[in-house]
Amino acid sequence: MNENLFASFATPSMMGLPIVMLIIMFPCILYPSPKRLINNRIVCIQQWIVNLILKQMMNIHNVKGRTWALMLISLITFIGTTNLLGLLPHTFTPTTQLSMNLAMAIPLWAGAVITGFRYKTKASLAHFLPQGTPVPLIPMLIIIETISLFIQPMALAIRLTANITAGHLLMHLIGGATLALVSISPTTASITFIILVLLTILEFAVALIQAYVFTLLVSLYLHDNT
């Protein structure tokens, strides 16, 4: 119980060298490209899920927006797999690091915004000043809309970081309480253990939902700019 709660969020290292890049690249090993004419069940399920997600996300996009399909499916696969692997004992979850989430959110947001200013300049500039705005409110409204635009990647990164970190901390606290209560009150310990199991199931759902929400918001930003 005296262990530092945030010790599991520290960047892991081996022989003094950070190994976070190896951890980030590890999910790629879990999705090998099929080389057979007839795929096995695992690859078929994987392709079915990919097609289902693509069909749902790409329905709202035009031809130019659909060129981002590979990027979006790679993003949701990476985030979802990383979140799920982080639920295993003694593992490190890269998506608990705000710096990494910002490194994903800012380039994708910037790419969508630049695309909008390049191909839909008038429509993109029109977002800063809605039609029918009173003249005295124009300067203030432009400032507010500009700030809200630049807050979008921060909101993306902070939402993912906060949800994954909160779940890990809660599991750590309840797990520590269960371990401490085993020798004091086995009945209470069994109740907290059941709560821990239910929370773990919930965290599996949260890991996938947060990956979907992150990718969906990037898709919506892209839709607004294409």
Image (spheres, grey):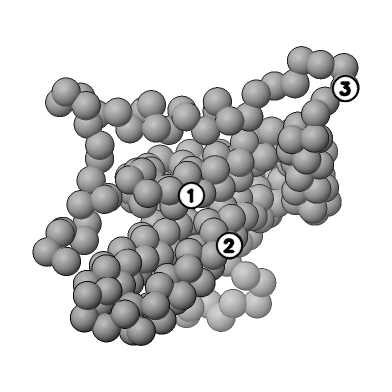
Compared with 164, 184 (above or below) is: below
Say few, some or many: other residues with alpha carbon within 10 Å of mark 2 (under 14 / 14 to 19 / 20 or more): few
Location of mark 3 (residue): 38
> Is residue 155 toward the left or the right of residue 79 in the image?
left
In the rendered image, is residue 142 in sight?
Answer: no
Residue 184 disc label: none
Q: Is residue 108 above or below residue 209?
A: above
Q: Look at 40% across and 65% down and name the residue there.
A: 167
Residue 123 lies in quadrant:
bottom right
| Horizontal and vertical percent position of residue 218 | 59, 50
Disc 1 crowd rating (10 Å Cα; few below 14, some 14-19, many 20+) is many
Residue 195 vs residue 188, the one in the foreground: 188
x then y, percent, for residue 165: 36, 60
Label 2 SS: helix
Going by the image, does 77 lie left or right of 157? right
Callout 2 amino acid: Ala
Q: Nearer the viewer, residue 182 or 56?
A: 182
Q: Is residue 24 visible?
A: yes
State the SS at label 1. Answer: helix
**N-term-proximal mark, 2 vs 1:** 1
**Mark 3 and mark 2: Cα distance apart in space:** 31 Å
Q: Which residue is mark 2?
A: 205
Q: Which residue appears at 25% of the width and 37% of the height?
A: 12
- Image vertical order of residue 196 relative to residue 5, above or below: below
| Residue 83 numbered tag | 1
Instruction: Estimate the x, y position of residue 193 in percent, counting from the top left.
Output: 40, 73
Circle 3: residue type: Ile
Identified by mark 1, the residue type is: Asn
